[in-house]
Image (cartoon, rainbow, N blue to C red):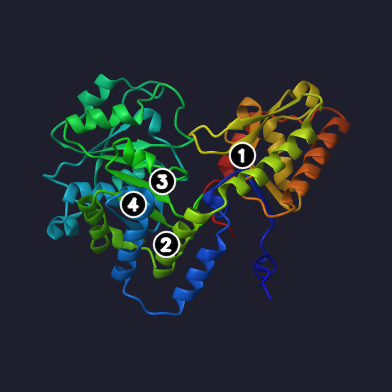
């Protein structure tokens, strides 16, 4: 009999309409990965052997020369940058984060200096490297990247994320061309991306993925790329990487998730997602002050979300107040509200259990009906939301 983890630990029940968010547990781990984790937990195994098996699997699916598993994609950023500074020199590996005398600068477009739960520049600096922003937040030009690369540049980091500025950034192909002309390797942070082959094909030397997002594995990261560079990153486990090492369960789970990915019914998954989106759109169509429309993923993943625009004068509720009302119910329904200050948000269907789309549709109706029936508008200043988030941010969950 399956354990009810919510009852055992006193957890709030959640329906995830936000996406593959680490703060919500990232994804529903696929059965094959859960089975592999359970199988390996009771066994001894040599971690190096397990990593070699992971390397073969990663290489087979990505077209890379080699790969390894890390504790997270954020850890992979730190480890790959460390590896590009030290190579396989164990003396240098043990010396980090002291990078005196090493090539220790990392160039990154200013529009890619995002926060994914922590600042990406901190993941760079944890290795001992120095961050060199390129261009402005809204535009990077080729000559700016070329000028930023010097004899002290160890790596060029390119980020693929919905958090990044969505215009004015250098395409990956051009970014790689300029970096390679200067003899600098390119790392691509593709944490939450479907494409397991395209970034290497476009010229990246190393590509980093989250094993626990769309892949549906346990919390983990994946490094894929050139064999010598992957080896240098892996060897950081004998240095600064020791503090965030990945366990046998993480490695075995990623191997199983990757194998499952290769045989997954992606078309069937998209069809179920589309059914949920169609239901939600039909629920919202013709409601006063609400515009619901399907929008594609901004980084090119093969999925859609439902964008909901609010006119608070007619709907009598703002996007941020709507998000708070959805989260306040039982179960809590967490929407994708990164851009709610502009009075729109998204519903993401990628992480639903069967039947949850109906629960969400019912809550959509209930919250919007309550707003229309209220005496006055359910509208709070967005500044109040910012203040409330600031007060809650970083609070130890006691």
Q: Residue 349: where, in percent of width, then height?
A: 64, 44
Residue 355: x %, y % from top left:
75, 53
- What number is the disc on residue 336? 1
Earlier residue among tags 4 and 2: 4
Whether residue 46 is situated above or below residue 127 in the rendered picture: below
x then y, percent, for residue 301: 51, 38
Q: Mark 4 points at which residue?
A: 223
Mark 1 surroundings within 10 Å by alpha-carbon count, few (fewer than 14), some (14 through 19), many (20 or more): many
Instruction: Kindly report the distance in space between the C-alpha atoms of the residues bearing marks 3 and 4.
Output: 11 Å
Question: Of marks 4 and 1, which one's residue comes earlier in the chain?
Answer: 4
**Label 3 neighbourhood size at 10 Å, few (<14), some (14-19), many (20+)?**
some
Residue 55's x, y, as percent? 32, 59
Foreground: disc 1 or disc 3: 3
Say which label, 3 or 4, has the lower sequence index: 3
Element type where label 4 sits in the image: strand
Q: Which of marks 1 and 2 is nearer the N terminus?
A: 2
Residue 267, picture quadrant: top right
Up the image or down, 343 lies above or below 247; here it is above
- Locate residue 95 relative to residue 269 in the image: left or right: left
Q: Which of marks 4 and 1 is in front?
A: 4
Between the residue at mark 4 and the residue at mark 2, the CA separation in whole angstroms equals 13 Å
Contact between marks 1 and 2 (CB within 8 A): the answer is: no
Residue at disc 3, secondary structure: loop
Q: Residue 255 carries which label?
A: 2
The residue depicted at 62 percent of the width and 25 percent of the height is 342
Nearer the camera: disc 3 or disc 4:
3
In front of the other: label 4 or label 2? Answer: 2
- Distance in Å between CA atoms under marks 3 and 2: 14 Å
Cα separation, mark 1 vs mark 2, equals 29 Å
Q: What element carries label 2?
A: helix
**Which numbered marker is on residue 196?**
3
């Amino acid at each position: 009999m399956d354990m009810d983890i919510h009852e055992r630990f006193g957890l709030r029940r959640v329906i995830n309409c936000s996406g593959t968010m680490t703060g919500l547990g990232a994804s529903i781990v696929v059965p094959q990965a859960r089975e592999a984790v359970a199988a390996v937990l009771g066994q001894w195994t040599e971690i190096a052997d397990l990593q070699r098996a992971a390397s073969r699997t990663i290489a087979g699916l990505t077209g890379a020369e080699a790969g390894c598993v890390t504790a997270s994609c954020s850890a992979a950023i730190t480890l790959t940058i460390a590896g590009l500074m030290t190579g396989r020199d164990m003396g240098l590996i043990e010396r980090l984060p002291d990078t005196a005398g090493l090539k220790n600068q990392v160039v990154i477009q200013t529009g890619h200096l995002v926060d994914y739960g922590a600042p990406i520049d901190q993941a760079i600096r944890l290795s001992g490297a120095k961050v060199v922003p390129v261009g402005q937040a809204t535009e990077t030009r080729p000559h700016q990247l070329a000028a930023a690369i010097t004899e002290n540049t160890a790596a060029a980091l390119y980020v693929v994320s919905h958090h990044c500025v969505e215009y004015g950034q250098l395409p990956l192909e051009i970014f790689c061309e300029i970096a390679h002309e200067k003899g600098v390797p390119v790392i691509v942070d593709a944490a939450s991306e479907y494409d397991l082959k395209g970034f290497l094909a476009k010229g990246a030397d190393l590509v980093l993925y989250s094993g626990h997002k769309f892949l549906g594995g346990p919390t983990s990261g994946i490094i894929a790329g050139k064999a010598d560079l992957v080896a240098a990153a892996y060897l950081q486990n004998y240095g600064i990487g020791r503090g965030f090492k990945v366990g046998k369960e993480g490695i075995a789970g990623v191997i199983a998730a990757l194998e499952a990915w290769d045989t997954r019914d992606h078309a069937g998954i998209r069809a179920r997602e589309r059914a949920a989106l169609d239901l939600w759109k039909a629920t919202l169509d013709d409601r006063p002050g609400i515009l619901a429309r399907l929008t594609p993923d901004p980084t090119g993943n093969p999925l859609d979300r439902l964008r909901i625009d609010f006119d608070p004068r007619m709907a009598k509720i703002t996007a941020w107040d709507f998000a708070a009302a959805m989260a306040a119910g039982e179960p809590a329904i967490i929407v994708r509200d990164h851009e709610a200050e502009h009075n729109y948000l998204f519903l993401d269907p990628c992480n639903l259990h069967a039947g949850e789309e109906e629960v969400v549709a019912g809550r959509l109706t209930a919250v919007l009906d309550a707003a229309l029936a209220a005496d006055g508008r359910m509208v709070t200043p967005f500044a109040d939301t910012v203040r409330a988030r600031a007060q809650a941010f970083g609070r130890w969950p006691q």
